[in-house]
Amino acid sequence: MTPKLSLVVPCFNESATLERCVARILAIATPSLPLEIVIVDDASRDDSLAIARGLEARHPEVRVFAHERNRGKGAALRTGFERVTGDFVAVQDADLEYDPRDLVGLLVPLEDGRADAVLGSRYRAEGLRRVRQFWHTAGNRFLTFVSNLFTDLELTDLETCYKVFRRDVIQSIGIEEDRFGFEPEIVAKLAGRRLRIYEASIDYAGRTYAEGKKIRARDGWRALYCIIRYNADHAPRAMRFLVYAGIGVVAGLVDVALFAGLRGVAPTPGLAIAAAYGLAAFVNLLLCRAFLFPVATAGVLARYAVVAVAGLIVDLGLTRALVETGIEPIAAKLLALLPFPVFNFVLRDRFVFSRATAMQGVGRDGDAA
């Protein structure tokens, strides 16, 4: 049976390019490469949906779905992935930045069974290419580097549009990001499953912002968050330690600030230490849930409480011992926190937020069951 390629085309205000984009896609169809084009209009404010409906009426390969409100690229892709029927699934932006002829080459490792996913790289390409915006390229390379640190992959282009998957693979992965966070999220989840990922060069004719480019600086910050968040359960140990250490530094600063404020009002120094530590531990928990594991079962919370109580005993004992040696209380509090990055990492990574405990009560790739 001839394998079919499904292309999911997220579309928001692309009336100027949508018809030409679909024409380019249809041009690669052959008897040995049948196509399905799933256009998902994300509540466009221009004529994009009407154009898409017209394409659907003229071309049996085209199917159109529409969101009632604008939800973002990731949400549009989620809608499309749920409805595709092809053996392989590709992402195709509705603009003219990417050349669908490159998809033929990206399919080869999938068709011969070597790959589960193939990503197109704009930075492996040779020959003629449109000169790109420096800061956009620099940001992409930085995000790719950080992602590689967490995934232990050697990708060259994290934010590429061209990603092609086996349908069973992409439909088994729950996409949570609604906007451009889809790119680091899907790479993280592919890496977490230890799937076979290939990369191949593609051409690229990038738009400027004046020409309609939609990604913004805030999407870069979100991408950094997504890199940490979606790699938390499988990143190399050194990277997990850095995340825990960063969370610990923030919680430690909260601890010291609260202790400084409570010293003058708490009945005893010990009560000030305990109250400050308890509130800082709550902040730590919130950060762990935001950056590491969003699902906290009763068992996870119970283990976290045990570790927090153990930490309080250590903190209280060290702080008092240092004060008795003549060290000023605030300085003693700071010194008492120095062992905590290692303490927190060892106990929380192995005991509280391990992959096994984090996945309790979790359904498809992070969705609460």
Image (tube, rainbow, N blue to C red):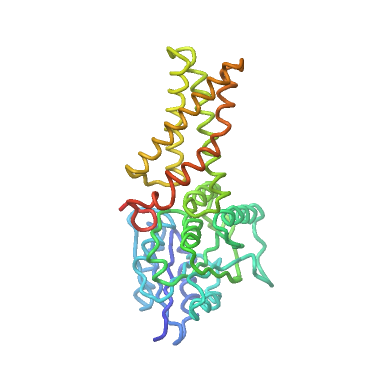
Say if 236 sits above or below 242 in the image. below
Depicted 103 relative to depicted 226: above or below:
below
Q: How many marks?
A: 0
Looking at the image, residue 146 sits to the left or right of residue 163; the answer is: right
Q: Quadrant of residue 307?
A: top left
* Residue 47 on image: x %, y %: 40, 62
- Residue 215, compared with residue 270, is above or below; it is below
What residue occupies the far left of the structure in this picture?
369
In the image, residue 298 sits, relative to residue 270, either above or below, namely below
> Along the horizontal axis of the image, is 316 left or right of 358?
right
Instruction: Give whichever of 235, 8 is nearer the camera.
Output: 235
Lateral position of residue 147 relative to residue 230, left or right? right
Which residue in the rendered view is the most extreme toward the right?
A: 127
Q: Position of residue 8 (x, y in %)?
A: 42, 68
Q: Dividing the picture into quarters, in which one does residue 119 lie?
A: bottom right
Please state, as top left, top right, bottom left or bottom right, where the N terminus lies in the image: bottom left
Q: Where is residue 107? Give x, y as percent.
A: 51, 77
Q: Residue at x 61, y 71 (%)?
A: 201
Q: In front: 250, or 100?
A: 250
Q: Which is nearer the eye, 345 or 233?
A: 345
Query: Residue 136: where, in percent of width, then height?
Result: 61, 54
Residue drawn at (44%, 14%) of the image: 266
For the point 41% across and 73% down, which residue is it?
A: 37
Taking the image as shown, residue 298 lies to the left or right of residue 178, namely left
